[in-house]
Structures are given as C-alpha cells and as structure tokens.
Image (tube, rainbow, N blue to C red):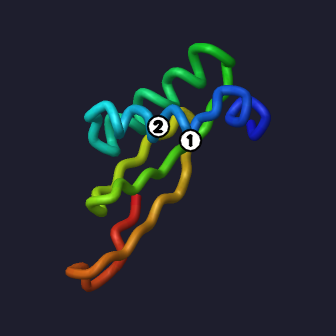
Amino acid sequence: VGEPIMRLTLARLAVGLLEGGCDPAEACTRSVALLEDRLAARCGLILVDRMGRIGSALTTESMPIAYMHTGLDVPTTS
C-alpha cells in the first residue's frame, strides 16, 4: 500500500484540501477515496489541522485510531 500512497502523494493531496477549505474529516475521506479510485489501493488516513481538529477515514476493513488532547480525560478511540 505504501507505493500507491507515495505515487498519489496522499499527504500533499490531503493538505491541499485543507488549504482549499475542507475540514480534516472531509479531506481524509476525499483523499482515501481518490487513492482507491485512481490506483485501486486501500488505506487509512489520520489528519490534524493547525487548529487541532482531527479527521480520519479508511477504505480498509479496519484501522485502529486513538488520540488524546487537552480537555479529554481518556483517549478517544475508534
């Protein structure tokens, strides 16, 4: 999966979507969908923007996600 991620430059794509006004969740969803459509590859992506908003998306069967920040007593998991 690493090679298709590099070929599409997935991180650059996701950051470009953030710069274009997408929130992190939408940027992740659109990025992993594009990877699957263009290169038939499945992956997951976690993204944090400069305001600390967190987004994630996956096209795999599962991917553990956890994060912690100020104001949370326990980590958020999915």
Instruction: Say which quarter of the image contains residue 2.
Output: top right
57, above or below 30, in the image: below
Residue 12 percent coordinates (x, y): 55, 37
Structural distance between the alpha carbons of marks 1 and 2: 5 Å
Give the residue at the far bottom of this rendering.
Answer: 73
How many other residues sit within 10 Å of disc 1, few (<14), some (14-19) or many (≥20)?
some
Asked whether, in this view, residue 63 is left or right of residue 67, the answer is right
Task: Say which mark, if any, is on residue 53.
Answer: none
Residue 13 percent coordinates (x, y): 51, 32
Tell me the quadrant of the picture where the N terminus can be found.
top right
Instruction: Say which quarter of the image contains residue 50.
Output: bottom left
Asked whether, in this view, residue 65 is left or right of residue 27, the answer is right
Give the residue at the far top of this rendering.
Answer: 38
* Residue that numbered label 2 is attached to: 14
- In the image, what residue type sits under mark 2? Ala
Whether the residues at callouts 1 and 2 have beta carbons within 8 Å, the answer is yes
Residue 66 percent coordinates (x, y): 44, 66
Give the residue at x 62% y 14%.
38
How many other residues sit within 10 Å of disc 2, few (<14), some (14-19) or many (≥20)?
many
* Secondary element type, mark 1: helix
Residue 11 percent coordinates (x, y): 56, 41
Q: Is residue 24 visible?
A: yes
Q: Is residue 61 visible?
A: no
* Secondary element type, mark 2: helix
- In the image, what residue type sits under mark 1? Ala
* Residue that numbered label 1 is attached to: 11
Give the residue at x 42% y 27%.
30
Instruction: Say which quarter of the image contains residue 76.
Output: bottom left
Give the residue at x 59% y 22%.
36
